[in-house]
Amino acid sequence: MIKIIMHGCNGKMGHVICDLVKNDPDTEMAAGIDITSVNAPFPTFTSVDECDIASDVIVDFSTAAAVPALIEYAVAKKTPIVICTTGLSQDCLKKLDEASEIIPVFRSANMSLGINLIASLLKKYSDVLYREGFDVEIVERHHNQKIDAPSGTALMLADSVNAGVSTDLEYVYDRSGVREKRDRRQLGLSAVRGGTIVGDHEVIFAGKDEVIEFKHSAYSKEVFAVGAVKAAKFIVGKPAGKYDMQDVMEEIG
């Protein structure tokens, strides 16, 4: 039985993950951490430093500001960590890199297997389309409560395109301040915020007289929660290092 500490247990994603774990015969919730008070059937703490419960893995779906302290806690406890929070600072990313030399660190901007399959395809085929003159644009849509833009997933997809093409593309987030033709080396990212959209992402390759789109739509938060639980199971017992959903997909495949 894999014991999980849920960091951000009182958030929307935290609730979904806790429900999945409750019904999973291979996992159980050892404890939860959240800055807000929680009424849960497992021990809960309002600060990571207060948590004295042993676990096999920590799953994080919280806020960017809360992640650095969690990294220090995981390293001190020698506990694998799954980071699902996006919008992390460069300093925080550096901390994760340093932590990965001591413990297993799993990080992905999106925990959906579908999104990660698209990312894999983009790395493999983007250069074919780019060399044929296709322009690349990414449009992402999320609910009106999301605070970061563009989404971490949109940036992950952009990085996948950039990793695949034979030149470095320039990310462009706003064209309102310039009046000029689109540069060939640009990769545009557009963010839409409204209603209760869970998450839509489109990668658009626009060529002469034809358009190719890679699109993913999430209709519930459960797709991300399922991926997070898969990641937690995957990382337990792994040696120190950096892991992501591509590693999970390889193991499944």
Image: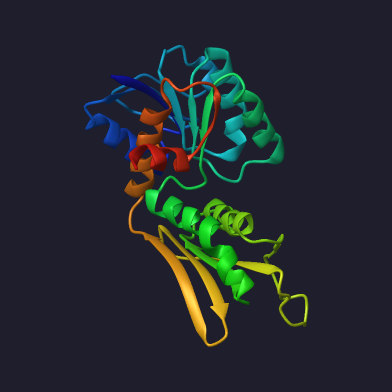
Where does residue 192 sit, x and y in percent of width and height? 53, 67
As displayed, is residue 211 above or below residue 101? below
| Residue at x-position 55% and y-position 39% | 63
Dividing the image into 4 quarters, which one contains the C terminus? Answer: top left
| Residue at x-position 62% and y-position 41% | 88
| Residue at x-position 60% and y-position 57% | 164
The answer to which of 214 and 252 lies nearer the viewer is 252
The answer to which of 210 and 233 lies nearer the viewer is 210
Where does residue 205 sit, x and y in percent of width and height? 54, 73
Q: How is the image coloured?
A: rainbow
Q: Is residue 190 visible?
A: no
In this rendering, the count of numbered labels is 0
| Residue at x-position 42% and y-position 13% | 53
As displayed, is residue 16 above or below residue 116? above
Where does residue 222 sit, x and y in percent of width and height? 32, 47
Dividing the image into 4 quarters, which one contains the N terminus? Answer: top left
As displayed, is residue 188 above or below residue 19? below
Q: Dividing the picture into quarters, in which one does residue 86 lie?
A: top right
As displayed, is residue 37 above or below residue 244? above
Q: Dividing the picture into quarters, in which one does residue 49 lie?
A: top right
Q: Is residue 58 visible?
A: yes
The answer to which of 106 and 19 lies nearer the viewer is 106
Where does residue 146 sit, x and y in percent of width and height? 52, 54
